[in-house]
């Protein structure tokens, strides 16, 4: 830091210089995040100074958070679910496992494990480190979903949680949550559903999937408004079926306006809660349905165009995420060639494939341009 500050004009010039180095979403096909809706951005700016970590000072912000939680809970089968607006799927996943771990510790269990599919988000590797819990990874079936036989083999008397994914990060697949729920109920095991991406997609698909609180065995769900919910970053949400799990996370806050906090972080952005509240109120279910419908139309358009070139998806897309199959040595070559044309795509781990997310910023013209460049590359 310099002794004397810079002028406003100098700062604005410096910011513009840095902004030019950021990529615009226009040709990004690797991100599950997108441009926030304009009403979300408006609300975010209005509540920039709001701190939900001391919510007694910001009662309007707290009311919006509570209403946003209720709306998201209703979308996921339980308007009476309990939770808060988090920073995103990683914090939500941590807090879900944190809550059940704390309960089991109070009950005297010392060694614990959780079971996730091989396609689970890398946040569960962080959970293993932070919470000192063994994370066991179940194998996948032919459709790249958690294999139920593998799950059954991994469960033992130290298993405190099973995690099902509703919209896997790499393939957009939905684990058999109903079957997992039945096992969770039978074995009295906490079931967490990671729906960070799929939570705002699955309810609006033509095909119906059982994945949320409508299943008795589902104990908690993570969902990200800052992805398909069109809110601003950072805006996730963690929901519990039972309020008692929030108590497992509570710590005293004697010098604040609230007696305790259940969130992982202390200072929390009221702006993100306001943005989430505003965009959900503005769009409603029909608005969200239209967004998902357009993303799925473009997904089908992309797959159809790829098939005309002789390129097939690894699995038929379940939601707005496509993985295209190439010979193993060909994926990296195609990726590099596309990036030289300005596209940003990603590659899955196993099976190795080209991964494309058809987020709301992707338009029909974008898909047509991409298919033209893909044909040129291959």
Image (tube, rainbow, N blue to C red):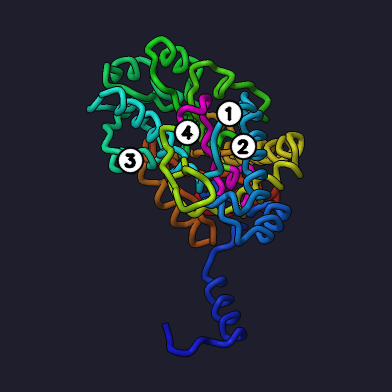
Q: Closer to the observer: label 1 or label 3? A: 1
**Residue designated by label 1:** 81
Q: Closer to the observer: label 4 or label 3? A: 4
Please rate how many residues cluster around mark 2, counting C-alpha atoms within 10 Å: few if below 14, some from 14 to 19, many from 20: many
Q: Which mark is residue 125?
A: 3
Residue nearer the viewer, 42 or 248 = 248
Position of residue 250 measured from the top left corner of the image (x, y, whole percent): 43, 38
Q: Looking at the image, do the residues carrying marks 3 and 2 touch, with CB atoms under 8 Å apart?
A: no
Position of residue 246 measured from the top left corner of the image (x, y, whole percent): 47, 33
Real-space CA distance between mark 3 and mark 2, rounded to the nearest whole angstrom: 27 Å
**Residue designated by label 2:** 69
Position of residue 374 measured from the top left corner of the image (x, y, whole percent): 55, 50
Real-space CA distance between mark 1 and mark 3, rounded to the nearest whole angstrom: 27 Å
| Magenta stretch: dominant secondary structure | loop
Earlier sequence position, callout 4 versus callout 3: 3
Real-space CA distance between mark 4 and mark 3, rounded to the nearest whole angstrom: 23 Å
**Residue designated by label 4:** 246
């Amino acid at each position: 830091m310099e002794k004397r500050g810079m002028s406003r004009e100098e700062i604005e010039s410096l910011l513009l210089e840095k902004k030019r180095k950021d990529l615009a979403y226009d040709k990004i096909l690797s991100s599950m995040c997108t441009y926030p809706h304009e009403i979300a951005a408006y609300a975010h700016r209005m509540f920039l100074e709001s701190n939900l970590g001391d919510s007694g000072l910001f009662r309007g912000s707290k009311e919006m958070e509570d209403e946003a939680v209720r709306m998201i809970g209703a979308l996921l089968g339980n308007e009476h679910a309990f939770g808060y607006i988090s920073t995103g799927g990683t914090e939500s996943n941590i807090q879900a496992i944190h809550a059940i771990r704390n309960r089991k510790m109070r009950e005297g269990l010392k060694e614990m494990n959780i079971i996730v599919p091989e396609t689970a988000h890398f946040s569960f590797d962080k959970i293993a480190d932070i919470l000192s819990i063994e994370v066991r990874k179940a194998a996948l079936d032919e459709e790249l979903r958690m294999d139920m036989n593998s799950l059954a083999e991994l469960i033992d008397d130290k298993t405190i949680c099973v995690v099902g994914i509703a919209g896997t990060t790499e393939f957009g697949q939905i684990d058999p949550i109903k079957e997992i729920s039945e096992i969770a109920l039978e074995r009295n095991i906490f079931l967490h559903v990671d729906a960070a991406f799929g939570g705002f997609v699955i309810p609006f698909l033509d095909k119906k999937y059982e994945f949320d609180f409508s299943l008795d065995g589902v104990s908690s769900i993570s969902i990200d408004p800052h992805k398909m919910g069109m809110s601003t970053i950072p805006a996730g949400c963690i929901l519990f079926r039972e309020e008692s799990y929030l108590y497992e996370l509570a710590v005293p806050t004697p010098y604040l306006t609230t007696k305790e906090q259940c969130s992982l972080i202390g200072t929390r952005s009221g702006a993100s809660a306001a943005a989430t509240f505003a965009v959900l109120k503005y769009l409603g279910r029909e608005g969200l349905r239209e967004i998902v419908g357009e993303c799925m139309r473009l997904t089908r358009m992309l797959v159809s165009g790829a098939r005309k070139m002789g390129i097939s998806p690894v699995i038929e897309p379940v939601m707005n995420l496509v993985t295209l199959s190439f010979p193993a040595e060909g994926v990296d070559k195609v990726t590099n060639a596309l990036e030289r044309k300005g596209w940003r795509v990603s590659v899955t781990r196993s099976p190795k494939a080209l991964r494309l997310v058809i987020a709301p910023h992707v338009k029909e013209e974008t898909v047509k341009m991409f298919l033209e460049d893909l044909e040129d590359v291959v």
